[in-house]
Amino acid sequence: MYCGCNEKAIRSQQAIACALLRQMECEPYDAISISALCRAAGVSRPTFYSLFGSKDDVVSFLLRESYSYAPEKSCDSLTELEAMCLGYSRYITGQRHFLSLLVENAIGYLLYQSIFEALLGCDCFLSGRDPSSRRYAANFAAGGLTGIVQDYVTREACSAEELGRVLEQMFSGAMFL
């Protein structure tokens, strides 16, 4: 995936990402061809492949650039667990439509990687733990949080605060006692 600073390439990436999002509103992800995506974005196939390796890369770009989960950068007023759970519940409720598109199209695995990277990139997430333990914990949390999205977007919605409490109970182990 292109990560440079060429303005024309960046505009083309954004056009492709917007076109994919629009097309996902109307047809299944698997039915969207690269050719149709390029036509909708107004770019050539070679341009697409110089910027992205696949449609999955476009979704990853959307997750990173427009729909990313950003863990709390400061946990001063809350415990790390409270901050993560409340922040993630606000993310889910705020991005429900986009997350629904991922779930409906069975591409939630891309969300998993995005969450994993966000947690590892957050200094607040299990600060002071050894890197190996943080990776295990980030994998565990990303899997659980991705699963929560799948359930949340297919059921009746609850508030961010209510969802945050449920997440905290699960991740603290209190729900299983």
Image (tube, rainbow, N blue to C red):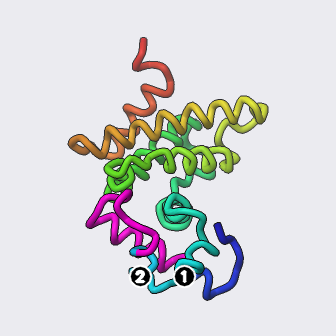
Q: Which residue is mark 1?
A: 12
Magenta region's main secondary structure?
Answer: helix
Q: Nearer the viewer, residue 158 or 25?
A: 25
Residue 166 falls in which quadrant of the image? Answer: top left
For the point 68% across and 71% down, which residue is it?
Answer: 3
149 over 2 or under it: above or below: above
| Circle 2 crowding by C-alpha within 10 Å: few under 14, some 14–19, many from 20 | some
**Magenta region includes residue 16:** yes
Image point (35%, 46%), residue name: 160
Q: Amino acid at mark 2?
A: Arg
Instruction: Report the disc number at residue 60.
Output: none
Q: Position of residue 60 (x, y in %)?
A: 54, 59
Query: Which residue, as the protein is rendered here, is positioned at the far top?
Result: 177
State which region is magenta: 11-35
Going from the N terminus, do you reach mark 2 or mark 1 first? 1
> What's the CA distance linking mark 2 and mark 1?
12 Å
| Residue under label 2 | 39
Q: Regarding mark 1 in the picture, which secondary structure is present there?
A: helix
Where residue 109 appears, as percent x and y from the top left, is 49, 45
Amino acid type of the residue tagged 1 in the rendering = Ser
- Residue 84 lies left or right of residue 121; in this view the side is left
Residue 159 found in image quarter: top left
- Name the image quarter holding the C terminus: top left
